[in-house]
Image (cartoon, helix red, strand yellow):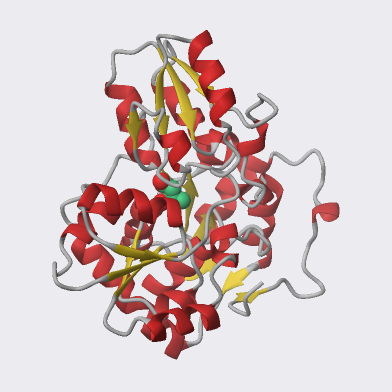
């Protein structure tokens, strides 16, 4: 864990202190009002968390929301680096996360010291870094990207400058192919998107010949090769809602299917399989750490809270603001497709 998280004090309430008869959704609603809080949730969160959030989205739209909110408190239901982004962009707000242990395998795969060394070995390169990284790595980067804007941002970079891309090598390779830009890739990957099995996917396609495959660019090439559509979560969501196909195989974290089923109940969505033929392998264990109990507790305890040293924040905010500036061509999504 980074030292950017303030943990609850010893006398804070714990899950054992919660009255089991408490209506948690109502209590969270009451605390949200009392504290002028906004609850932001990623598409990879459990359906019940998505349903109580004020806004559901991907990292790009959640960053935009965090930067623009007038709330005093942001409860960020996602993983820790997303809460850090909210605090970097909105330093005057209290940013709470339900579970301080909600990390990210990509963040783990790219430690700041090693990244500093990587940069030093390629001094003439522009460092394009996926948002799934620590505040320290952001501070060492030139521009941050998400899977929604990576291609659009790379296309805006000077053609005569070589590019470093970290930490997801699959997303980097995909963007390099799409843009024709040469990139030196950091050798990281997401444990979730690495789980999908090409063999099981092919078997599933044979059993569902009408199904379109939509895959996230964090998937290895062998999976992307079978995809009818490749995109970020919000982009896959737009694709399945716009398509006439009746059935879809979804190769990303399967909780995104919650929004798909709500917005298009007449369509069938199947989570892409892992090596054992089931789809459970792709549930993110870090995203799953957040629960209604922990959301309630973080609002009660005012912790875990993200705090970032100001010198680190000032260094990390530059590449994030550059990202927001260079993403103007990527419109804000509605979040929940069924929302007004
Ligand atoms: O950018 C994000 O939020 C992630 C992690 C995936 C996606 O495609 O939305």
Say whether residue 90 is visible.
no
Q: Nearer the viewer, residue 337 or 108?
A: 108
Q: Residue at x 37, y 71 (%)?
A: 89
Q: In the picture provided, is 298 more to the left or to the right than 164?
A: right
Quadrant of the image occupied by residue 322: bottom left
Q: In the picture provided, is 69 more to the left or to the right than 223?
A: left
Percent x, y for residue 328?
17, 57
The quarter of the image holding the N terminus is bottom right
Q: Residue at x 68, y 66 (%)?
A: 301
The quarter of the image holding the C terminus is top left
Percent x, y for residue 324?
25, 63
Q: Nearer the viewer, residue 83 or 272?
A: 272
Residue farthest to the bottom? Answer: 311
Say whether residue 132 is visible.
yes
Position above or below: 146 against 115: above
Q: In the picture provided, is 17 more to the left or to the right than 57?
A: right
Q: Nearer the viewer, residue 39 or 155?
A: 155
Position above or below: 313 against 87: below
Percent x, y for residue 300?
67, 61
Position above or below: 6 against 217: below
Position above or below: 245 against 195: above
Percent x, y for residue 25?
62, 40
Count of picture labels:
0
């Amino acid at each position: 864990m980074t030292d950017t998280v303030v943990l609850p004090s010893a006398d804070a309430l714990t899950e054992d202190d919660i009255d089991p008869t408490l209506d948690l959704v109502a209590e969270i609603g009451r605390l949200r009002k009392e504290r002028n809080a906004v609850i932001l949730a990623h598409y990879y969160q459990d359906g019940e968390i998505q349903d109580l959030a004020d806004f559901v989205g991907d990292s790009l739209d959640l960053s935009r929301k965090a930067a623009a909110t007038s709330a005093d408190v942001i409860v960020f239901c996602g993983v820790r680096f997303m809460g850090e982004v909210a605090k970097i962009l909105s330093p005057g707000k209290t940013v709470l996360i339900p579970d301080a242990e909600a990390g990210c395998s990509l963040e783990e795969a790219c430690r700041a010291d090693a990244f500093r060394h990587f940069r030093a070995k390629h001094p003439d390169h522009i460092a394009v870094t996926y948002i799934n990284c620590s505040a320290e790595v952001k501070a060492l980067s030139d521009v941050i990207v998400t899977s929604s804007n990576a291609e659009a941002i790379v296309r805006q970079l000077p053609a005569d400058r070589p590019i470093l891309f970290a930490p997801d090598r699959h997303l980097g390779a995909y963007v390099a192919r799409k843009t024709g830009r040469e990139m030196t890739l950091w050798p990281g990957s997401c444990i979730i998107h690495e789980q999908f099995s090409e063999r099981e996917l092919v078997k599933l396609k044979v059993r569902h010949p009408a199904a379109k495959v939509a895959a996230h660019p964090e998937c290895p090439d062998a999976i992307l090769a079978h995809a009818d559509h490749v995109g970020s979560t919000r982009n896959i969501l737009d694709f399945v809602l716009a398509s006439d196909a009746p059935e879809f195989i979804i190769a990303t974290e399967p909780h995104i299917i919650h929004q798909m089923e709500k917005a298009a109940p007449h369509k069938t969505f199947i989570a892409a399989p892992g090596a054992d033929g089931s789809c459970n392998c792709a549930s993110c264990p870090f995203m799953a750490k957040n629960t209604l109990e922990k959301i309630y507790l973080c609002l009660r305890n005012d912790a875990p809270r993200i705090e970032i040293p100001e010198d680190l924040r000032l260094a990390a905010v530059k590449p994030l603001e550059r990202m927001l500036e260079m993403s103007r061509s990527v419109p804000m999504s509605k979040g929940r497709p069924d929302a007004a």
